[in-house]
Image (cartoon, grey):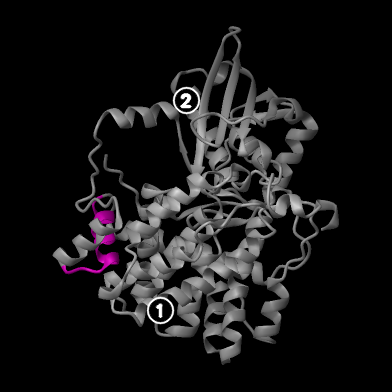
Amino acid sequence: MEECISVFDMLKIGVGPSSSHTLGPWRAAERFLAELTQELLLEQVLRVKVDLYGSLSLTGIGHATDLAVMLGLSGQDPEYIPVENIDKIIKSIKSTHQLHFGNQLLIDFDAEKDIVFNKNFLPFHANGLTFTAFLSDQKEYQTTFYSIGGGFVVKEERINAKKKQEIKCAFPYPVQNAQELLDYCNSLNKSISEVVYENEKSMRSEETIHNELMRIWNTMLECMYIGCHSEGILPGGLNVRRRAFDMHQGLIGLSNYNNPQEWLECIRKTEVKFRQILKWVSCFALSVNEVNAALGRVVTAPTNGSAGVIPAVLMYYLVIENHNAGEKEIKQFLMVAGEIGSIFKKGSTISAAMGGCQAEIGVSSAMAAAALCEVMGGTPEQVQMAAEIAMEHHLGLTCDPIGGLVQIPCIERNTMGAIKAINAAELAMETDAKNAKVPLDKVVNTMWKTAQDMNSKYKETSEGGLAVAVNVADC
C-alpha cells in the first residue's frame, strides 16, 4: 500500500496546545458537520453529544480537547480563527448553554453533560471520539473518529478498507521508507528537497508551493516573535511562568523593531557570542511552546507538543550559520523536514498516545536535524544519518505531562530536541556516510517496536512518570 503524504500534511497551521488532543478533535468535529451536511441532516439536529475515549479523556481537560470540540462544532476553523476570539466563544457557549452549530443554527448544548469523558480505550487507537446527533424525527446519527497524531484524523472503516486494496500514490516518486528516498536521490542525482519538490509539483502549482511554504514559515516566525514578547503565567493551573520573554530581553537588550521580519533582521545583526548560541536556540523553542500552551497559533511540526523544535533550528540556521540565507533555503529546510516526518509517520507513529514522546520530540528533532544538514551542504546520505542520530538519542522517551498539560516537561523538551538536532546535523556533516552503522529505516522500525513495548501509562495518560510523581498542587 502506497501512502502519499505532502509536506503540507506534516506541517499544518493550527491552534495549541496539542495536535492530537486539540487540533485533531477540532478537525473531527468539522468532519462530523460535513457528514451531516452531506446527508442533508444538519438542519434536523436538535442536540449533540460527544464521547471522548482513552487518552483524549484522561488528558483531555489539560489539552483543551473539550474546548476544541466546541469550537469545531461551532464551525470555527483552527487555521484562521482569530485566537483572541476563542475565550469569548467558549464563555458564550457555557453561559447560554447554546451552541451555534455549524455556524448556522442554535442548538441546546451543556458542555458538562454533552461532552462525556470515558476512561476506557477504543480498540483501534488510543485517541477515539464519537459524535452523536439527536434529530428532530427522534432518530440518531452517530460516527466515530480517531485522532492519530499531528492533526491527522481517520475512521477505522477507512483504514480497514485500505488493507483490502492497493492504493496508488499520485506522486511521481512515491516514498514509503528512507531507502526508497535515497534510491530516488541517487538515480535522479537530486537532493532530498528536490525530490520532494517534484512530488509537490504533481499536486499543486509552483506558485502555490512557494506561497504555502512561506506562509508556514511566517506563522512560525510570528509565533516565535509573540512568544518572545509575551510575559506572565501560562493558563492551566500549574502557574508556569513564561521564560522566553526574560531570556529574550537578556539576549537582545534595547533594540528597535516593529514586526517579526524586522526582529529577525535585528537578531541577525546582533553580535552573538559563542556561549549565547544555546540560549538563543532555547529561547526560540521556548517561545513557540509557550504560545502553544496558551492556545496560540502554531505549526504542527509534526505535532503541536513538538512545534518549537523545527522553528528554533531553522532560526538558528538563519541567524547563526548563514546570514545570507533567504526564501530558497527556508523552503528547502521545510521540505526536507516534512519528508523525514512522513517517513516516521508511515513506518512508526507521530502520536504520543501511541508511542510516547519519542514520537513527538524525537521525530521533530530528526526532522530538524535532517533539514539543517541539507541546507548546510550535506549529502542525502548524511541528511538521513542526521535524522537517525537525532532519533537514536530520543528512543524510549515517555510522555508523562503533569496535569495533562503540554507544559511540564513538554516545553523544555523542545529546547532539548532542538539542541540535539543541531548536534546530530554537525555529527553527520563530519562523518563519511559509508561508515554509517544504523540506517534510518532501522531506527524508524526500532522506534515503533519501542513504542509497542512501552507501558501504556507512559503514553500521554497522566498515569505514570512525572505526572504522578509530582503533585499538581505543588506546582
Q: 65 left or right of 268?
A: right
The residue that appears at 43% across and 49% down in the rendered structure is 448
Point out residue 421 in the picture as x, y percentages from the top left corner. Answer: 47, 71
The residue that appears at 62% across and 46% down in the rendered structure is 460
Task: Tell me the element at label 2.
Answer: helix
- Circle 1 sits on which residue? 427
Quadrant of residue 126 in the image?
top right
Q: Tell me the CA gap for discs 2 and 1.
A: 50 Å
The amino acid type found where label 1 is placed reads Leu
Point out residue 382 in the picture as x, y percentages from the top left corner. Answer: 31, 73
Q: 162 left or right of 19?
A: left
Residue interval drawn in magenta? 189-202
- Circle 2 sits on which residue? 35
- Whether 216 is among the magenta residues is no
- Whether 201 is among the magenta residues is yes
Front-most of 275 and 330?
Answer: 275
Residue 312 seen in this snapshot: no
Residue 51 seen in this snapshot: yes
